[in-house]
Image: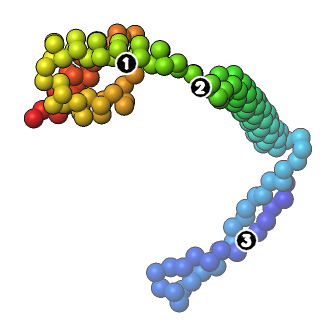
Amino acid sequence: MKQLIVSVLFFNAIPAFAQVQQHQITIYEHKKHDSTSRFINAMEAGQRARYYREQMELIELQKTAYSLQLRQAEFDQKERERAARLAAARAPATAQPQTAQVITAAQQAEIVERTNIELALFTAKYPDWKTIEKEMMHFASRLEPKNMSEQEYLEVLYVLAKSFFKK
């Protein structure tokens, strides 16, 4: 232990009567073997251990995030490859040039005759269809007759044109 003598000025209410008093202050030196230094060393060691543990947790989190990013990148790559394969599989079916069908005069006459019969039947059922024929053609350019007969298709066009283009 060392003792240090410090001079401290204490001022009274009147500065002219300032007095100097001497006080003795004992200063303890930290030695490696005293209990205070051991306590401080243990606290510092605990702080270092917590710091290193937190650093390891951070590294583990970074590894997890990186592995998730890799998985996502692999998934995206597989998805792009699958979409490319699907597009490639669809492309030949749609890209093949359609061969022009050669219709003979007899076939053409049969088509015209069937069309005239269908239109005659439709005119018998809906005599005013010729007044909205232009509107029916508007919908015919947008709708395909999937799974419908000619009469059903004409009726759908008629109802749509009648309801949308009321005169």
Farthest residue toward the right? 32
Determine the CA span between mark 3 and mark 2: 115 Å
- The answer to whether one can see residue 53 in this image is no
Q: Which mark is residue 100?
A: 2
Q: Which residue is mark 1?
A: 112
Mark 2 in CB contact with mark 1 (< 8 angstroms)? no
Instruction: Characterize the local packing of mark 2: few (<14), some (14-19) or many (20 or more) Cα atoms within 10 angstroms.
Output: few
Please tell me which residue is depicted at 13% across the width and 19% down the height of the picture.
127
Q: Quick check: 42 above or below 110?
A: below
Which marked residue is nearer to the observer: mark 2 or mark 1? 1
The first of marks 2 and 1 along the sequence is 2
User: In the rendered image, which residue does mark 3 sit on?
Assistant: 6
Mark nearest the camera among 3 and 2 is 2
Crowding near the residue tagged with mark 3, few <14, some 14–19, many ≥20 C-alpha atoms within 10 Å: few
Q: Secondary structure at mark 2?
A: loop
Q: Position of residue 103 (x, y in %)?
A: 53, 20
Q: Amino acid at mark 2?
A: Ala
